[in-house]
Image: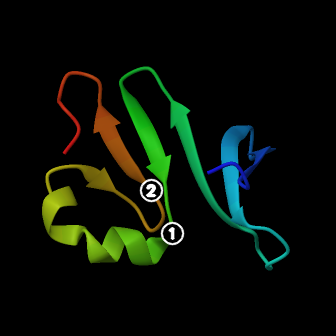
């Protein structure tokens, strides 16, 4: 998506999908020692709750371990 803006938020790479909203509608991702965290909108996590139930999730994050394929 060429119109997506890149920025750093909480020291994490972020992609702003809808600029100017409060807060910006964005998606973030970050690599850690044992997993990659994906930070979509909470509604996205709720929508995909069933396929994501095998993964550690939080209010706004999903952790994908390196040793497992992505769903």
Q: Position of residue 29 (x, y in %)?
A: 54, 42
Q: Position of residue 62 (x, y in %)?
A: 37, 52
Task: Label 2, secondary structure: give it.
Answer: loop
Residue drawn 44% across the image and 68% down it: 59
Q: Position of residue 5 (x, y in %)?
A: 77, 51
Please state which of residues 31 and 58 is positioned toward the viewer in this rendering.
31
Residue drawn 46% across the image and 47% down it: 38
Q: Position of residue 54 (x, y in %)?
A: 14, 51
Task: Kindly give the residue lying farthest to the front in the view shown.
Answer: 2
Other-residue count near label 2 (Cα within 10 Å), few / some / many at <14 / 14–19 / ≥20: some
Does 61 sit left or right of 50 as displayed? right
Task: Give the Cα distance between marks 1 and 2.
Answer: 8 Å
Residue drawn 80% across the image and 68% down it: 19
Position of the C terminus by quadrant: top left
Mark 1 / mark 2, whichever is N-terminal: 1
Contact flag, marks 1 and 2 (Cβ < 8 Å): no
Other-residue count near label 1 (Cα within 10 Å), few / some / many at <14 / 14–19 / ≥20: some
Does 64 sit left or right of 12 as displayed? left
Residue drawn 23% across the image and 38% down it: 70
* Residue placed under numbered mark 2 in the picture: 61
Please state which of residues 5 and 63 is positioned toward the viewer in this rendering.
5
* Residue placed under numbered mark 1 in the picture: 41
Above or below 8: residue 61: below
Quadrant of residue 67 within the rendered picture: top left
Above or below 59: residue 10: above
């Amino acid at each position: 998506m060429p119109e997506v803006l890149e920025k750093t938020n909480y020291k994490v790479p972020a992609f702003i999908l809808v600029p100017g909203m409060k807060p910006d509608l964005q998606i973030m991702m970050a690599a850690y020692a044992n997993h990659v965290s994906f930070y979509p909108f909470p509604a996205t996590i709720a929508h995909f709750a069933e396929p994501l139930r095998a993964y550690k999730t939080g209010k706004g994050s999903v952790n994908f371990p390196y040793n497992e394929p992505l769903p």
